[in-house]
């Protein structure tokens, strides 16, 4: 988790059933509900970037010799945590 000086506080409205799932998961994992929610958002954002990259690479087409994809390298690294 980021240090508290690197975070913001916000109000989040959840359906009761989802809140129950979050608190149950947090209890089972021995972490806070905030950590469960933060991890879930981080994972969804990573999947979003991966989907956008897939769509962008799909648009490149078959002729890779003529495709300019260098601009995607930083996005790819971000989506794959630098791998």
Image: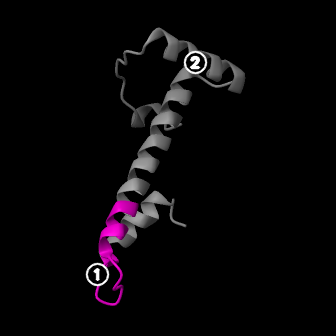
Q: Is residue 36 left or right of residue 12?
A: right
Place residue 60 in its image quadrant: bottom left
Nearest to the observer: residue 7 or residue 66: 66
Quick check: 57 above or below 81? below
- Local packing at callout 1 (Cα closer than 10 Å; few below 14, some 14-19, many 20+) is few
Residue 82 drawn at (x, y percent): 51, 65
Q: Of the numbered discs in the image, which one, if any, rests on residue 41?
A: none
- Label 1, secondary structure: give it: loop
Nearest to the observer: residue 58 or residue 10: 58
Residue 31 drawn at (x, y percent): 64, 25
User: Please, which residue is most extreme toward the top here?
Assistant: 16
Residue 63 drawn at (x, y percent): 33, 86
Residue 20 drawn at (x, y percent): 56, 12
Quick check: 18 above or below 45? above
Q: Which residues are magenta?
A: 54-70
Q: Is residue 41 left or right of residue 24?
A: left
Q: Is residue 8 left or right of residue 2?
A: left
Q: Residue at x 63, y 22 (%)?
A: 26
Quadrant of image for the C terminus: bottom right
User: Please, which residue is most extreme toward the bottom here?
Assistant: 65
Q: Residue at x 41, y 37 (%)?
A: 6
The residue pinned by badge 1 equals 68
Q: Residue at x 50, y 35 (%)?
A: 40
- Label 2, secondary structure: give it: helix
Nearest to the observer: residue 74 or residue 44: 44
CA gap, disc 2 and disc 1: 45 Å
The residue pinned by badge 2 equals 21
User: Please, which residue is most extreme toward the front here?
Assistant: 62
Place residue 4 in its image quadrant: top left
Nearest to the observer: residue 29 or residue 2: 29
Earlier in the chain: of badge 2 and badge 1, it is 2
């Amino acid at each position: 988790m980021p240090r508290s000086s690197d975070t913001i506080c916000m109000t989040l409205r959840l359906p009761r059933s989802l809140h129950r799932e979050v608190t149950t998961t947090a209890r089972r994992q021995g972490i806070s509900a905030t950590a469960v929610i933060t991890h879930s958002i981080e994972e969804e954002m990573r999947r979003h970037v991966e989907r956008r990259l897939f769509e962008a690479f799909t648009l490149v087409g078959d002729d890779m010799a003529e495709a300019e994809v260098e601009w995607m390298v930083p996005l790819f690294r971000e989506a794959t945590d630098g791998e």
